[in-house]
Image (cartoon, grey):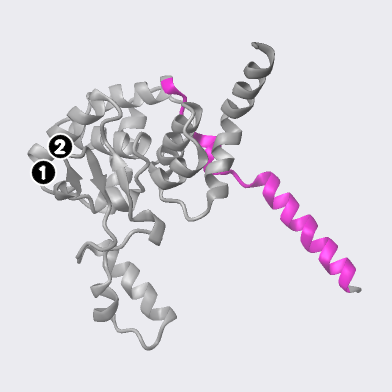
């Protein structure tokens, strides 16, 4: 068989996969669904109610990744400047970090488990170390105040982040899957619809590639709508 045949077959397989693969932005919650999710957090028993509300707002409005939430510390918040600062490194020996370190050593024979653990925890990419405004709404501010009054750090594991979101979702009538990363996509979609430009949106979400921010803005349709209104409402 020719190289052209193999290339054509490979392209066809990739095309079929692109049609069947579900992307996170397809699971974005509407504003109503997000409000229902927050409402459901209050129905959970203490202390899961506050923990779930913190997770949902941190992911669904601030755009934090699940790993960032699991490693959150109260000292990350600068209340004077109303910023949440995600550091480049936060010493950690949790089970998740140990598993990640062990995985790194399997791909690098010269790296020891101890050396890999010294670098833990760190955010996903260099761009993920960022400062996020927290004065976006009074509801968000109050949740962060109450959470940091009670906890110096997120009190549970990375798995617990998933469990809190799942518990809140099961207490609602939201159709479809609800999980931490879809809440992060919900935050991106929300801010894109509010009119946040690509570069600030990239900085907020901690993306390495500007194209990701541009995708959410394109999907929101806000830029297209604004351009059309400027033309037709002169």
**Do the residues bearing badges 2 and 1 touch, measured as CB atoms within 8 Å?**
yes
Residue drawn 46% across the image and 51% down it: 207
Report the side of 207 relative to 35 (left or right): right
Instruction: Kindly give the residue lying farthest to the left in the view shown.
Output: 149
Other-residue count near label 2 (Cα within 10 Å), few / some / many at <14 / 14–19 / ≥20: some
Label 1: which secondary element: loop
Report the side of 92 relative to 60 (left or right): left
Depicted 63 relative to depicted 126: above or below: above
Instruction: Kindly give the residue lying farthest to the right in the view shown.
Output: 2
Quadrant (top left, top right, bottom left, bottom right) of the C terminus: top right
Rendering coords of residue 50 (x, y %):
18, 33
Highlighted magenta segment, given as a residue range: 3-31
Does the segment drawn in magenta span residue 41? no
Residue drawn 24% across the image and 41% down it: 83
Rendering coords of residue 130 (x, y %):
33, 51
Rendering coords of residue 76 (x, y %):
19, 49
Does the segment drawn in magenta span residue 12? yes
Q: Which mark is residue 151?
A: 1
Instruction: Kindly give the residue lying farthest to the bottom in the view shown.
Output: 110
Q: Which mark is residue 67?
A: none
Residue on which disc 2 sits: 147
Rendering coords of residue 168 (x, y %):
31, 31
Question: Looking at the image, which is closer to me, 230 or 75?
Answer: 230
Is the stretch drawn in magenta largely helix, strand or loop?
helix
């Amino acid at each position: 068989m020719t190289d052209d045949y193999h290339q054509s077959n490979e392209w066809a397989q990739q095309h079929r996969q692109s049609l069947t693969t579900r992307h996170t932005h397809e699971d974005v919650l509407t504003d109503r669904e997000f409000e229902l999710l927050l409402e459901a957090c209050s129905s959970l028993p203490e202390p899961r109610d506050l923990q779930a509300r913190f997770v949902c707002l941190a992911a669904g409005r601030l755009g934090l990744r699940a790993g960032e939430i699991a490693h959150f510390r109260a000292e990350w918040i600068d209340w004077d400047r109303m910023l949440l600062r995600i550091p480049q490194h936060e010493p950690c020996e949790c089970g998740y970090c140990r598993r990640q370190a062990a995985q790194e050593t399997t791909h690098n024979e010269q790296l020891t488990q101890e050396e890999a653990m010294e670098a833990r925890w760190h955010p996903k990419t260099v761009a993920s170390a960022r400062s996020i405004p927290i004065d976006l709404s009074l509801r968000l501010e109050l949740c962060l105040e109450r959470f940091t009054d009670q906890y110096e750090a997120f009190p549970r594991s990375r798995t617990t982040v998933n469990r809190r979101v799942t518990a809140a979702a099961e207490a609602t009538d939201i159709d479809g899957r609800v999980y931490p990363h879809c809440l992060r996509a919900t935050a991106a979609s929300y801010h894109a619809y509010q009119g946040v430009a690509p570069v600030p949106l990239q900085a907020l979400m901690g993306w390495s590639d500007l194209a990701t921010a541009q995708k959410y803005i394109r999907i929101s349709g806000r830029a297209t709508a604004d351009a059309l209104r400027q033309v037709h409402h002169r």
